[in-house]
């Protein structure tokens, strides 16, 4: 199935090649969980600080382990940020 991934800031280095700066459409296995997707792109749990699926926040831990992705979902991931 096809989903969209959006990696921001320092996580952009994990994106596969493409034309968009931070977004890619990728093919993944049916029934893949959010945690498995994050692991597939070698993003650590600490790096995946803020994770949204279709604009809705998903807590780390069990919520990410059990959240299966569906065709057309958009997964957005931000690292921890500092500043002010």
Image (cartoon, helix red, strand yellow):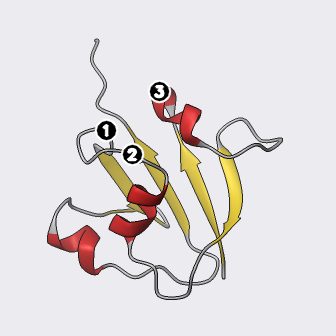
Crowdedness near tag 1: few (<14), some (14–19) or many (≥20) residues, C-alpha within 10 Å:
some
Q: Which mark is residue 68?
A: none
Residue 45 horizontal/vertical position (percent): 25, 48
Residue extending farthest to the right is 19
Asked whether disc 1 touches disc 2, contact meaning CB atoms under 8 Å apart, the reply is yes
| Upstream in sequence: badge 2 or badge 3 | 3
Tell whether 28 sits left or right of 56.
right
Residue 20 horizontal/vertical position (percent): 77, 41
Q: Quadrant of residue 19?
A: top right
Mark 3, secondary structure of its residue: helix
Crowdedness near tag 2: few (<14), some (14–19) or many (≥20) residues, C-alpha within 10 Å:
some
**Residue 63 sits above or below residue 58 on the image:** below
Asked whether disc 1 touches disc 3, contact meaning CB atoms under 8 Å apart, the reply is yes
Alpha carbons under labels 1 and 2: distance apart: 6 Å
Where is mark 2, residue-wise? Answer: 43
- Towards the viewer: 68 or 54: 68
Where is mark 3, residue-wise? Answer: 10
Where is mark 1, residue-wise? Answer: 47
Residue 16 horizontal/vertical position (percent): 68, 46
Tell whether 58 sits left or right of 40.
left
Q: Residue at x 38, y 68 (%)?
A: 36
- Towards the viewer: 56 or 12: 12
Q: Residue at x 45, y 64 (%)?
A: 37
């Amino acid at each position: 199935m096809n989903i969209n991934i959006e990696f921001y800031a320092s996580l952009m280095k994990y994106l596969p090649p493409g034309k968009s700066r931070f977004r890619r459409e990728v093919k993944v296995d049916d029934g893949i969980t959010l945690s498995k997707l994050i692991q597939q792109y070698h993003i650590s749990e600490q790096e995946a600080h803020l994770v949204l699926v279709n604009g809705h926040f998903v807590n780390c831990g069990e919520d990410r382990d059990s959240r299966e992705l569906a065709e057309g979902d958009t997964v957005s991931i931000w690292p921890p940020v500092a500043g002010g």
